[in-house]
């Protein structure tokens, strides 16, 4: 069942990782494509702008040279223009494909292709770059650049710049606004080749990024998926622990459950539970992760737990105290002015996730202890702090069922104080209550943790000893008798000697008797102990007729 659950969890995790990875890669792929396209556009525009700047700069150089020649009225101006154009074209042969100087009629007065000289090269009504300038709102453009096809079908960047007419030129050219136009074609083949290389590099970089991102994203997604799975498992664990805590209101069962939670779920190496007793006293129970059950622990004066216990008893301890090195945790469970339990756990170092789990559990543990204490108050006698007779009826039935299931024995002790009436009559009820309370404490001190002691009524007590045969039951009964007989009860200068009579009944699996019959047998043994002289133990089991 558990293996099947793990397989389902693993398949769920795989599907989750696959979905996240595919969706993430789709998003990243779209982003990379968009960014790559944007980069290509930006690079292309940048290269074109650089080409525009270069061709305009060359046009300006040619115009400056022309102006100088015209101002000096050079006799060989046509030849000089040709030399300038050829020099520019030669020095820029990888980029300049054509240089043409047009007059105001649109006729070529110079061209790197001599066949164009003396004829109209471009129709200003049809050529796209002419229309772009002549149809513009601003008819006074000085330069205009445009990507076009030249007469050889090559893609070129054509820059048309106006050769302005200045006052110094009026003597030769009259008062017209312009003297002509300079047309410079720059081939884009080299620029295009470079751009294609850059575009290819961008695409390669984009694909490389995607390929590099796949393992990185996969690792990240695995991490997040593992965290989701861990959180899911911790949530399931939290719910199961809360359910387990909520199932019992028995303080002893709750104590064991909480200790197991600290050992198994929080991974504590050592857990101690401190339970309050009357008169400011307390008892400490301990369990380690090495195994074994919960055992009572004696606290020495130098024990580091003493300081925490004192703060807890004084109400000065925070609800959850975690040491800086995360090696020690104290969970304080208390109501205002009333400590209920103190849980101390130690480990090499508690994981932060385990501490978070404990934080989530702490309030539920506190509520469970409060409910258990309320239940304990309902089933506990106010004076003696032993269980009540009503709870005895419930417990004896439960223990007989357990004895039948396990095949182990069970022993019932019925205990009665000898001549208690003389104490009440001679010293008063207050002293009598003190004696009853003290006797109850000595009974509790004489039995094991999983044994149960009850005030059956008046000065009569009962003790249920699970998993106990008649021989061991007799030893416990005699220990109780001696602990009460050997030490007097002292209060306000009074010293009162008391004894008890004990009747014992032993239950076996094949006894086939009810709880009422078992109680009757123990009562019968108690009455016999009284009759034969008190301060003694008398045994009755299912094999005795009387």
Image (spheres, rainbow, N blue to C red):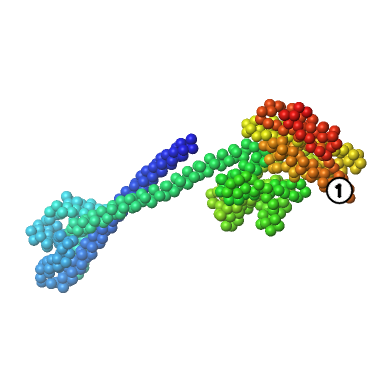
Q: Quadrant of the C terminus?
A: top right
On screen, residue 256 versus residue 110, left or right, reads right
Q: Is residue 181 visible?
A: no
Residue 241 position by quadrant:
top right
Report x, y in % for residue 415: 79, 37
Q: Is residue 79 left or right of residue 62?
A: left
x 56%, y 52%: residue = 350
Q: Which residue is mark 1?
A: 491
Quarter of the figure with residue 414 = top right
**Left or right of residue 443: residue 104:** left
Q: Secondary structure at mark 1?
A: strand
Q: Residue furthest right?
A: 426
Name the one closer to the observer, 333 or 105: 333
Q: Residues within 10 Å of mark 1 (few under 14, many from 20)?
A: few
Picture coordinates of residue 186, whole percent (x, y) = 19, 59
Q: Give left or right: position of 110 versus 23.
A: left
How many labels, in total? 1
Picture coordinates of residue 338 (x, y %)?
A: 73, 47
In the depicted structure, whether residue 465 falls above or below residue 166: above
Using the image as rendered, state which of residue 324 and residue 149 is in the foreground.
324
- Expressed as whole percent of the image width and height from the top left, the position of residue 494 reads 89, 48
Q: Residue at x 15, y 60 (%)?
A: 97
Seen as rendered, the residue at the extreme left is 115
Residue 284 visible (yes or no): yes
Residue in the image at 28% along x and 53% along y: 204
Q: Residue furthest bottom?
A: 72
Between 326 and 61, the residue placed more toward the observer is: 326
Tell me which residue sits at (25%, 62%) in the image: 53
């Amino acid at each position: 069942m558990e293996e099947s659950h793990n397989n389902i969890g693993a398949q769920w995790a795989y599907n989750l990782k696959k979905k996240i990875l595919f969706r993430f890669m789709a998003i990243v792929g779209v982003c990379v494509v968009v960014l790559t396209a944007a980069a290509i556009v930006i690079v292309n525009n940048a290269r074109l702008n650089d080409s525009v700047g270069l061709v305009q700069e060359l046009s300006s150089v040619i115009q400056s040279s022309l102006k100088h020649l015209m101002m000096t009225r050079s006799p060989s101006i046509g030849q000089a223009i040709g030399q300038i154009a050829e020099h520019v074209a030669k020095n820029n042969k990888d980029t300049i494909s054509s240089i043409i100087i047009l007059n105001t009629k649109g006729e070529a007065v110079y061209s790197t292709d001599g066949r164009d000289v003396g004829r109209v090269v471009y129709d200003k009504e049809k050529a796209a770059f002419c229309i772009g300038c002549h149809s513009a709102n601003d008819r006074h453009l000085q330069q205009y650049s445009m990507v076009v096809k030249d007469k050889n079908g090559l893609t070129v960047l054509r820059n048309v710049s106006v050769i302005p007419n200045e006052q110094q030129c009026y003597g030769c050219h009259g008062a017209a606004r312009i003297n002509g136009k300079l047309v410079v074609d720059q081939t884009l083949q080299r620029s295009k080749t470079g751009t294609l290389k850059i575009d290819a590099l961008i695409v390669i970089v984009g694909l490389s990024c995607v390929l590099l991102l796949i393992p990185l994203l996969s690792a990240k997604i695995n991490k997040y998926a593992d965290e989701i799975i861990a959180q899911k498992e911790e949530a399931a664990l939290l719910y199961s622990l809360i359910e387990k805590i909520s199932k019992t209101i028995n303080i002893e069962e709750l104590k064991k459950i909480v200790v197991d939670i600290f050992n198994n779920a929080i991974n504590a190496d050592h857990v101690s539970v401190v339970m309050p007793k009357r008169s400011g006293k307390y008892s400490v129970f301990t369990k380690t992760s090495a195994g074994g059950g919960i055992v009572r622990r004696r606290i020495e004066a130098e024990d580091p737990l003493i300081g925490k216990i004192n703060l807890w008893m004084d109400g000065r301890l925070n609800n959850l105290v975690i040491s800086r090195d995360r090696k020690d945790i104290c969970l304080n469970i208390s109501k205002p002015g009333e400590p209920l339990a103190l849980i101390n756990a130690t480990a090499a170092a508690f994981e932060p996730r385990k501490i978070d789990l404990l934080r989530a559990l702490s309030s539920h543990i506190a509520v469970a202890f409060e409910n258990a204490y309320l239940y304990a108050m309902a089933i506990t006698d106010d004076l003696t702090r032993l269980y009540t007779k009503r709870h005895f009826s419930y417990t004896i039935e439960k223990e007989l069922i357990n004895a039948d299931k396990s095949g182990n024995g069970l022993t019932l002790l019925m205990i009665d104080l000898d001549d208690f009436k003389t104490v009440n009559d001679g010293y008063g009820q207050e002293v009598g209550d003190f004696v009853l309370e003290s006797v109850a404490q000595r009974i509790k001190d004489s039995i094991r943790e999983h044994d149960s002691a009850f005030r059956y009524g008046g000065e009569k007590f009962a003790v249920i000893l699970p998993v106990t045969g008649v021989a061991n039951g007799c030893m416990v009964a005699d220990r109780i008798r001696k602990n009460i007989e050997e030490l007097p009860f002292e209060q306000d200068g009074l010293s009162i000697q008391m004894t008890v009579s004990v009747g014992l009944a032993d239950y076996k699996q094949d006894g086939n008797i009810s709880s009422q019959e078992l109680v009757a047998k123990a009562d019968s043994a108690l009455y016999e102990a009284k009759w034969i002289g008190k301060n003694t133990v008398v045994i009755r089991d299912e094999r005795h007729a009387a």
